[in-house]
Amino acid sequence: MANINIIGSGGWGTANAILLASNGHKVLLWSYKQEESDNLAKYRENKPFLPGVSIPDSVSYTADISKCGEADLIVIAVPSHAVKATCKNLAPYIKDGQRILNISKGFDEESLLRLSQVISKEIPNCVVASMSGPSHAEEAAIGMPTTNVVACEDSNLAEYIQDLYMSPRFRVYITDDIVGLELGGSLKNIIALAAGICDGAGYGDNTKAALMTRGLVEITRLGVKMGARPETFSGLTGVGDLIVTCTSMHSRNRRAGILIGKGMTADEAQNEVKMTVEGVRACYSAYELAKKYDVEMPIVEAIYKVLKGEIKASEATELLMGRARKKETEREWLM
């Protein structure tokens, strides 16, 4: 049995608490607000995010981050925009060599760093891994068969995390390509937002299939320029996560996109969804990264302009469909 502290009690943080507690581990779940922590303890259920799903008795709760500094594993599960500040607050209580797993997706908007880089910068005395894959919290929490991938340059840590999570209902693979894993998990949210816009605008399956395929090309282009291996994007944390996020109504990014496609602004759509829509923030970061690494990302650029209110969704379609003719090649991401 391991002692595991999970920092962040949203849907995915709570689902991870359920997964790990069900494997016999002792879990402490930290909430940003005392009221949220009290409600979790009272009802043993995350009513806003996972209504009707019972949390095992072996999970305990706190809103005091000073109690979360020592564990066999610390899991970071807060929204991307909160990772930097949360880790800064957690850092004074961390022991040297602490093992940390990042399960959040996105970038630091100011520095454009990946989240594992943010964690390492704010908590330099730790060892960091990341986990990602096609895994909606609503399904994983109730035991629907789910797969994820753990990435870390330290193979021993990757295997340790794999062992903690593995069960008949949650299968974990490992890789050393943490760059590719994190980029796939972050950038697919932008394409899911675009897929939702297509749905909201009334486009069909042909349109979405094209969008997802060309979106994966853009993800791979940027990923390779940033040091990832292209084959990573053919796996669970690339095309796998892309499929589930673009097609499922569990996806808050797709749901927000549908509202934007129907005419709402980005702010109106996010307020309606009432949850963090990571694709919006990721799009702003990806737009800047594309410029920094001189990578052609027309879908990202079009969605960026829609989110900024510079063009309408229908105009984005015209921009993408009216681009100059080109070939589709096996090494498309290098062109």
Image: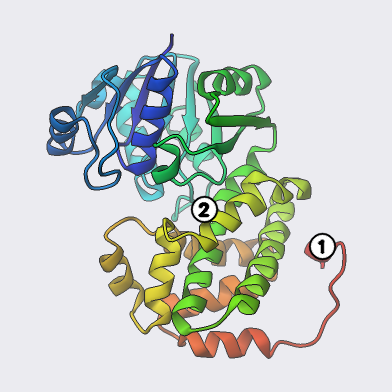
Task: Specify the amino acid type for callout 2.
Answer: Leu
Please name whichever residue, 55 or 213, is drawn nearer the observer in this view of the structure. Answer: 55
What residue sits right under mark 2 in the picture? 112
Q: Is residue 88 left or right of residue 126?
A: left
Up the image or down, 4 lies above or below 291; here it is: above
Task: Specify the amino acid type for callout 1.
Answer: Leu
Q: CA distance from mark 1 to mark 2?
A: 22 Å
Please tell me which of labels 1 and 2 falls first in the chain. 2
The answer to which quarter of the image holds residue 155 is top right
The structure residue drawn at horizontal position 51% and vertical position 24%, both measured from the top left corner, is: 165
What residue sits right under mark 1 in the picture? 334
Residue 30 % position (x, y):
27, 29
| Element marked by disc 2 | loop
Q: Is residue 323 left or right of residue 287?
A: right
The answer to which quarter of the image holds residue 219 is bottom right
**Direction top: furthest residue:** 1
Residue 125 visible in rendering: no
Q: Is residue 141 left or right of residue 320?
A: left
Up the image or down, 218 lies above or below 206; here it is: above
| Element marked by disc 1 | helix
Nearer to us: label 1 or label 2: 1
Residue 289 % position (x, y):
59, 61
Give the total number of marks visible in the rendering.
Answer: 2
Residue 172 % position (x, y):
60, 30
The answer to which quarter of the image holds residue 89 is top left
Quarter of the picture holding the C terminus:
bottom right
